[in-house]
Amino acid sequence: MAASRFIGRVGGLAVALGVGVGAAAFSGHAVAWADTSDSGSSASSEAPSAANSDAGSTRSPRTSPRGRGASTTADASASVDPGPQPQTRISRDNSTPDIPDIPEQSTPETAPPPLVESVPADFAPVEAASAPSANQAAETWTNSVNAAPAAALAPPADPLPAAVTIVDPVLIPVLEPAPTAAPTGAVSGFLSKAGDLVTDDAGTGSLPVAMPLEWAYLAYSRRELSGPAASVDPGPVAKATTSEPLTKNGITVNPTTALVDGIIQGTMQATSERGNPLTFSWVDSRNGVDGTNGGKVVLGSVPVGNLPTPDAKPVTDPQSYTILPYATWLDPGVAKTTQQFSIRVTEVTEFDEFVTGIPLIGLVAAPVITLLQQLPLISDLLAPIIGASILATINVDVAALTKDGAPVAFTYRVPSFDGTLISTNYFPASGLTAGDEAPAALFGPGLGGGGEVNPYGYSSTNDFTPTVAALRAEDYNVVTWAPRGNYDSGGVLQLDNPFYEGRDASAIVSWLANPSNNLGAALNGPGDPKVGMVGGSYGGGIQWVTASTDPRIDAIVPAISWNSLPESLYPSEIFKTSWGNFLLLALEVLPPVTGNAAGARINDLIYQAILTGNLFGRVGESPLAMVNSSGPTVLLNKLEAPALIVQGTYDSLFPLDQAVTNAQTILANPYDTPVKMIWFCGGHGACNDEAVPAPADQRTQIYADTFAWLNQYVKGEGTAADAIPTFQWYDQRNALWTSDLFSFDEGFNKPQPLVTTSDGGSLAILPLLGGSGSSGVPEQFKGTPLATLYRFPFDRFIGVGASVASNAINVPITVGVRDQVVGAPELTFTYSGLGTSRAVFAQIVEGPSPEFPDGRVLGGLVTAVPVTLDGKEHTVSMPLQQIAYSQYPDRLSPPLSLQITSSATQFANSAIGFINISDINLELPVRA
């Protein structure tokens, strides 16, 4: 449409109506919560296994839960068939494919041949008939990077049924239980004592100094799982209501709602007479419109048709929604009733698109149009120009939908040890019916996340952690939650501290096991549910501290987690400025953008640590003690829950050494705890190189191992976890390798490492210029003035990747064909110099090559090497970041080199000076 059609109308509307910019505001979020209380904030959620059973293990398999039938939908006028229930399970594929091809380059005349054509047959790894022993001369390699997809899980039937109208159904009275006290015993007694030692003061953010004796006491404590069930009282029974069709200014909306396999969902069925596109936004109760206490809505969430597998990314219906009603019926004397949610439906006209597309003006025009669409009378007059907007109310009669006791997904605030309310979401296992039981999976979110609220949610997190849909399809009740200090949960965030977040998770376990709550929890014994834990990053860290202190956790699958936060964020007392600032952004900036208006409420010492780290490069004693108390460390000496560790090879926040330390600590404890480890292509970093894309079957493989692990150690079904290799890793070409030994076990590597030496050289130390990561400018910014703008204010603070440095000492490395380097190279050199810098930075670089003309840093990892520039001669020796590298023949393995450079954006600082480096010695572990 021609621009001239709208020019006069824009000015005329603004002048005639006198609408100010300050009066206009957007309304609605894609994921939102309804809450009439003052305890939380509107928010969106963050989206988003198998080990050896050692003969000496003190843990015995659990009995499996009893069988279950198909799910039902309670409705007076119609029923919804959820379709066939999934029977098959993801399993390991034992095929032996070739190493993957490398995509051809853009210039065919110079492009090298595919990878598989250049690999000699004697180097191609093969699948061993049986795992080799540790004292064999050589191990058999397994490569399954192109393995055929595992058996797909049968998805539920089409999750978006036809409209269901509920009219005065005959309801069966349901007894509404009152909650019981948590089981008493050793652990509860200890936690009570620990509560006398520490408090969760929102004003001071107080936290105990890290004391290993306190941690050890916490780890040794165990809960006596006993206690009678509470009495129950019947509550009033509500009648079902319907969502009435609504027509206004050319928009017709006829919402439908039904219970489908435990999920309340529906579609808006909205149309525009003018044929305009429609947008949908949830109206929060805090805006004074409507809503019920704590309910959560996700718009555009229901898949169209069936998912091919539960790990597939769904194509969703933009007019659909899923609803988690607030479980008022879990409160004493309160019955299930009708809850209301309102969705605003808005037309988008060509005029709207034109005006909002004008630079700068569009920022002002958008909220003005939104306001005009909602003003009485004016909205009617202007509807043909700016589009109409109406508010549709969805009535969810939970009592009618679940009148036969059908399980339903919901949200509820669970009280923790100190009374802090933790916003918790419950999803019943797929096919669960009234009276049935299933084991549970606790799915923790990443830092700043509010817990998954979308039963069909999918994000990058799901590369290493199964989705809610996949967990439900594997017959697990799924529980997600917003950690304390986030979203609708109370309290102050303490970074997965065992005294706080660990006890919160234990409170959720007690709540899950309480029979009065009717959550269909399969039990090992009174107060002891069959329960495993999954999740990554912050959701991985919580698993360590919970399972090490609560004996009821049967198995864990922590992904991209840590052993020590100081070693991760402050290695060798060199502060990671990029990650410190990024984590603060995740807590304070991103939550408001995604709907959490108040942001996170965090311990004051976290601010102090990041501020002093940025300004002075150091973290004070009190903040350091606080950070040191958050995570597993010595707690792992008491861990009995089998642990499948999943860590990323492209992770600059929690690098591979954190997983290695966790595994070593567990193996050294006296409980013969089963533990296995996977290094996958990903982590807190990108694994999406155009030349070597991420392995297509990686997610399927991790899902298969996760479920094998959980099924054996949580359900007590089969021995699939025994078949998982002790150690798996993807190399720099994304080929999957396996071993019966860990990388740190004797016999994994040759007795003598590969040694590379150099005389060294001189290096000028300048802030950022020429260092690692300083060229990490997005492609669209290269060659423009924005490149400089991006590099300094943004790369300096949030650049988390490493790139080839131009100001560096380069040392060529010669690795033999068919050799593999899996582990940490050891670097030693002598130096002297003057300046203010406290570190230089070392990294292993691959290339340049046809695939990587500028070269690339293996894993995007750089190591801070501490130095003292006082003019005297010193010698330093330390391990570099762990890598996973295979040397292929010909062009497939570009030359390697060691770079020692002056700066790195991960550790941005303003240091200057110079350094002379000599007698460089690099030792690389080479696999036997």
Image: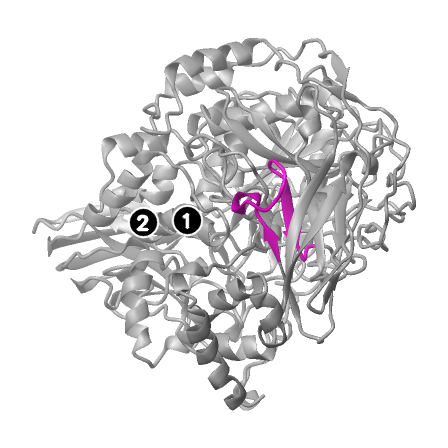
Residue at 38% over, 43% down:
568
Residue at 55% over, 9% down:
186
Magenta-span inclusion, residue 298 = yes
Snapshot colouring: one colour
Task: Where is residue 682? Give x, y as percent.
Answer: 53, 55
Judge left or right: residue 364 versus residue 622.
right
Q: Nearer the viewer, residue 246 or 535?
A: 246
Q: Nearer the viewer, residue 685 or 590?
A: 590
Q: Which mark is residue 653?
A: 1
* Position of the N terminus by quadrant: bottom right
Badge 1 amino acid: Leu
Residue at 90% over, 40% down:
76
Badge 2 amino acid: Lys
Residue, disc 2? 576
Q: Which residues are magenta?
A: 281-301
Judge left or right: residue 876 versus residue 547.
left
Quarter location, residue 799: bottom left
Residue at 68% over, 25% down:
330
Magenta-span inclusion, residue 300 = yes
Say above or below: 647 vs 27.
Answer: above
Do labels 1 and 2 touch, CB within 8 Å? yes
